Amino acid sequence: MVETGVSSDLLRWIPALPLLGALVHGVGLGLLRREMPRGLVVAISCGAPIAAFAVTCLALAQILGSAGESRVLVDEVFTWIGAGRVSAEMGFSFDPLAAIMCLIVTGVGSLIHIYSIGYMDDDHRDDGGFQRFFAYLNLFLCAMLLLVLGDNLLVLFLGWEGVGLCSYLLIGFWYGDRWNAYCGMKAFVVNRIGDFGFLVGIFLLLGSLGDAATLNFVELKAALPKIVEQTISVPAWLPGPESWRLTTLIGLCFFLGACGKSAQIPLYTWLPDAMAGPTPVSALIHAATMVTAGVYMVCRMSFLYVEAPGASAVIAWTGAATALFAATMAIAQTDIKKVLAYSTISQLGYMFLAAGCGAYGAAIFHVGTHAFFKALLFLGSGAVIMAMHHEQNIDKMGGLRMRLPVTHGVFLVAVLAIAGFPPFSGFFSKDEILLSAYAADQIPGHQWLWAIGLVTAAITAFYMWRLHFRTFFGDCRADPESQRHIHEVGWVVLGPLVVLAAFSFGAGFLGLPQIYGDWLGVPDSNALANFLHGVLPHPEHEIAHATELGLAGLAIGAATLGTLVAAWMYLWSPAVPARIRAALGGVARLVENKYYVDELYDALIVHPLVAVSDKLLFRVVDAGLIDGLGANGSARAVRGLAAHVFKYGQSGLTQGYLITMVVGTLAIVVWMLR
Amino acid sequence: MSAPAVFFYAFGAAAVLSALSMVLHLRNTVAAAMSLVVTMISLAVVYVVLDAHLVAALQIMVYAGAIVVVFLFVVMLLNLRHDVFAQRRERLVKLAGVVLALGAAFAFLQLVPNSLPTVQEIPADFGSYAAVGRALYRDFVLPFEISSLLLLAAIVGAVVLAKRRLS
Amino acid sequence: MEIPLEHVIGLSALLFAIGTVGALTRRNLIVILMSIELMLNAANLAFVGFARAWNSVDGHIFVLMVIVVAAAEVAVGLGIVIALFRNRESVNVEDVSLLRW
């Protein structure tokens, strides 16, 4: 074990506190068979993340006050698995990267816990739904914190699987509806595909390191030069070079895992369906934290990706393609949460684009700003959904600006942030990503990546404004009866929204590029990049200030264009969308149906798999061979022998048995004396 | 030939003869039981010759005194003084029995003498009540206690089995 | 000691064989039980003979145990005979062969 930082017992409490909350709720529900008083549930489950947030702040204060090596806190709790050369400690390390993720997870997590008190208040099922929800939410927080704090791949993987489990539990939380349960399973199964890649990557890494096999990130980084030169030959039928660098293969395996968790092409299909869960879950898990785990993992393994240019290029292109693809799908959605889901996929694509281009700091920056504004968007949409009595279709909303002024205000902040208007946070992080794509000349076709990013930015602005206009402007399209019941929700719900709005506005200044810092007279204005310096590899591109400003201007222009088009279509001439739709015909249907990707997967993968499993594996192998031949067959054979052969030995004559016994005994005696 | 040897061979022969008498008394069950008593007592004498004094005493008390008496009780209770069954025997079975017995005897005579241990010198008090009692109550006290449980179970079983059912 | 071990074991074997023949050939359950007693006695004799040869009283202890078991067996066995006779008016083993195919 390498001591690579200041030892601190503080860290273990960050994941342990939410775990305690989950245990108290879960065990309490299991033993008492009834819900605890709601006040107690709230106190425990909201106290846990807030306490974890406080501990995180303490740890952060500790590393902010020091420099160099001691900017890392480590906490080795116990040896989890010791297996020969390889051992996995239950160890945590708190470096700047983990610190940022921890702050996001506990901070946003605490706000969403508080929000959930209001949102889940009307869950009065007799299975202790309210308490169960908070138990899952606390458990999720614990797993997510394990994921970001783990100092080795196995603890990271433990958290990785833990968040997957909680995601499954929470998507299917209202399991009374079969569709929700199905969506949970879909998320779980699709994630399994990614996890498979992740595991193969871990095994490849372990296997290729030989004697230096380790899982610890610091040790891995030190041991990596041993395998950098290794190559492996690929089958001849694959296109491309005859041999790949091992690091590229490992990087791709890890990226497959990231694709599953972070909903990238081709494994993104689960995330839109994950919206079946309660809205706070969508905000916390499927927007702010869990889905960024893939980005975090790629950044955590950045020392590997630096040595794997092929894998990095794949990541960048996958990210860009996902960003554009998902953004186009978001245009035609009418479910408020589905729009946000596709927007999340698109934004995650941006993050991978940055990570692939080597701008890991920009990726993490966008993770942070996205966590704020996307959580805000989801929670805002949740407030709208609550106000509309669980109506999620934006075709039945409209004109809510007057009725829900606070919600409208915070939603507007979030839309401005995600659309990328300065000085909202989204502008800075997105601009940094576009800049890094523009400058990443190690990636083939990096200008195209930049162009895709720019187009996506315009589309993002368009669909977000469309959502905003459709929801808050125009005439209310709900039926008159429900219109009378629309009212602003309580402050326990709105409070977190306001806090998140403040961060959505201001978080960008943490990563203020130096070029603007010079204007404002702030030295070292990119605090985030300085903080992460030394933890993440830094792209070394010199870009002229004029170019940088020009690119920023283009981004603003794209966002403005998207906004204007949306305003034209949905504010000024409401008849236009229908006309466009009619003019486009098939294309519009294609987009509305999400390019039929789900149907394609069903036809190409799911149905053949189900058919093979049912017709061959179940009916032939399991029922036929294992049950029929193996279990029942052997039993039938024994029964047949007994019924037709052995039964004649059962004569009922005592002395017949006796003589058999005597002969047998004699034989044994003779054999023993021989 | 010394006196103990005379006793051994004489009572050994008596035991064998009375055992044969028991098996061959086809008609009279009481006579068979009495033959068994003779066998038991003859064996007790043989035990004395072989320095097993406690065993010899128990042999007379338990076997001759108790077990055979129980047999006689049952025979008289069931009024079975005369065995009335026809003894059917097929020739083939008889032949097989003879062949089997001869084979067993041959194997025994071939194998056993070679595998017997060499006789060791024994102390003067070998097999005395004191020596056996020491072994019984020191080394084998747990089996001894457990055997009492076995007897209890047998008593209960016998009572349950033989009790007349109250209709 | 002037009596060879072979002779003791031979006597034991002879008695055991007679008991076996009795148990195998007689049809009267009570006589079969008696034959079994004879076989047990033959085993006891072997124990006593070997105990003397090995200079170990463990054999005598075993004989005591065998006597205990024999007493228990006779008690239960004769109990069964009585129960059987009550039900079937017979103590012939060939009459008790219901448990067959």
Image: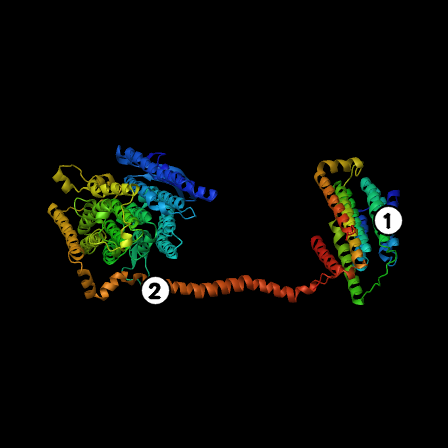
- The answer to the question of whether label 2 and label 1 lie on touching residues, with beta carbons closer than 8 A, is no
The answer to whether A622 is drawn above or below residue A504 in the figure is below
Does the rendering let one see residue A265?
A: yes
The kind of residue tagged 2 is Leu
The local secondary structure at tag 1 comes to helix
Decide: few, some or many residues near mark 2? Use Cα within 10 Å; few <14, some 14-19, many ≥20: few
- Give a yes or no on whether discs 2 and 1 share a subunit: no
What number is the disc on residue A604?
2
Q: Nearer the viewer, residue A340 or C91?
A: A340
Q: Quick one: quadrant of the C terminus of chain A?
A: bottom right
What number is the disc on residue B37?
1
The answer to whether A183 is drawn above or below residue B42 in the figure is below
Q: Nearer the viewer, residue B14 or A72?
A: A72
Q: Residue at x 39, y 63 (%)?
A: A609
Chain at tag 1: B
Quadrant in the picture for residue A92? top left
The kind of residue tagged 1 is Val
